[in-house]
Image (cartoon, helix red, strand yellow):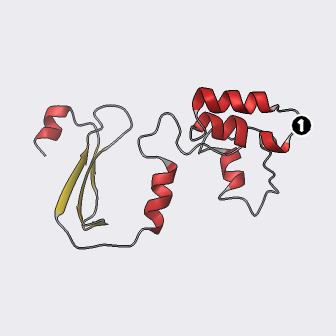
C-alpha cells in the first residue's frame, strides 16, 4: 500500500499506528527525495508555514496534527492520554447538544480532569427538550 498521510483516521493511518506490527511502513519526506527541489519546500514553507498541516503532509510526509473537520485534535487526545489524573478542583458540567441525525446529546460531570459520573446520553431531542434536561 502506498499513499499520502492526509488524514488521522482510516486504514492507511491505522497501518502506521494501531496496526504497525502488521505492516512494514516507510515514510519519505521531500528532504529524502531527489524529486523535490529546495524551491518547492521553501515555497510551501512560505505559503503555509512550517507548523501547518499542509507542510507536514506535503513536505515532511507526516500525518496532520488535526483533520479539518474535527473539533478536538489528535494531538490533544494523545496529550490527554498521558496527563496526570487530578481529581481535585471545582465541579464542571459539560453538555454537547446533538440536535438531529445519528449523534447523541451528551451530559458529563467532572472534577478536576476526572469524569466523576457516567456520561448520560439522549437521542432525538430537539433544542428545547435539551434545554429542559
In the rendered image, the vertical position of residue 56 relative to residue 121, given as above or below: above
Q: What residue is rendered at 22% in x and 73% in y? A: 88
Residue 123 vs residue 33: left or right?
A: left
Which image quadrant is residue 7 in? top right
In the rendered image, the vertical position of residue 67 relative to residue 78, given as above or below: above
**Quadrant of the rendering where the N terminus is positioned:** top right
Local crowd size for mark 1, using a 10 Å CA cut-off: few (<14), some (14–19), many (≥20): few
Q: Which residue is mark 1?
A: 34
Which image quadrant is residue 43 in? top right
Q: What residue is rendered at 73% in x and 59% in y? A: 20
Q: What residue is rendered at 64% in x and 33% in y? A: 45
Residue 57 vs residue 109: left or right?
A: right
Residue 65: x and y, percent? Answer: 55, 45
In the rendered image, the vertical position of residue 40 relative to residue 104, given as above or below: above
Q: What residue is rendered at 26% in x and 73% in y? A: 87
Residue 80 vs residue 39: left or right?
A: left
| Camera-side residue of 70 and 35 | 35
Residue 4: x and y, percent? Answer: 73, 38
Q: Secondary structure at mark 1?
A: loop
Question: Number of labelled discs?
Answer: 1
| Camera-side residue of 123 and 76 | 76
In the rendered image, the vertical position of residue 73 relative to residue 45, given as above or below: below
Residue 12: x and y, percent? Answer: 70, 45
Residue farthest along the right direction in this orientation: 34
Residue 125: x and y, percent? Answer: 22, 37
| Camera-side residue of 125 and 2 | 2
Amino acid at each position: 500500500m502506498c499513499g499520502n498521510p492526509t488524514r488521522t483516521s482510516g486504514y492507511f493511518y491505522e497501518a502506521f499506528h494501531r496496526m504497525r506490527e502488521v505492516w512494514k511502513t516507510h515514510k519519505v519526506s521531500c528532504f529524502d527525495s531527489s524529486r523535490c527541489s529546495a524551491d518547492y519546500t521553501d515555497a510551501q514553507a512560505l505559503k503555509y508555514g512550517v507548523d501547518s498541516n499542509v507542510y507536514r503532509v506535503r513536505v515532511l510526509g507526516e500525518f496532520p496534527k488535526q483533520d479539518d473537520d474535527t473539533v478536538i485534535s489528535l494531538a490533544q487526545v494523545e496529550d490527554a492520554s498521558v496527563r496526570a489524573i487530578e481529581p481535585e478542583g471545582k465541579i464542571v458540567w459539560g453538555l454537547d447538544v446533538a440536535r438531529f441525525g445519528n449523534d447523541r446529546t451528551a451530559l458529563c460531570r467532572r472534577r478536576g480532569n476526572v469524569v466523576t459520573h457516567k456520561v448520560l446520553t439522549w437521542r432525538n431531542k430537539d433544542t428545547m427538550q435539551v434545554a429542559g434536561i
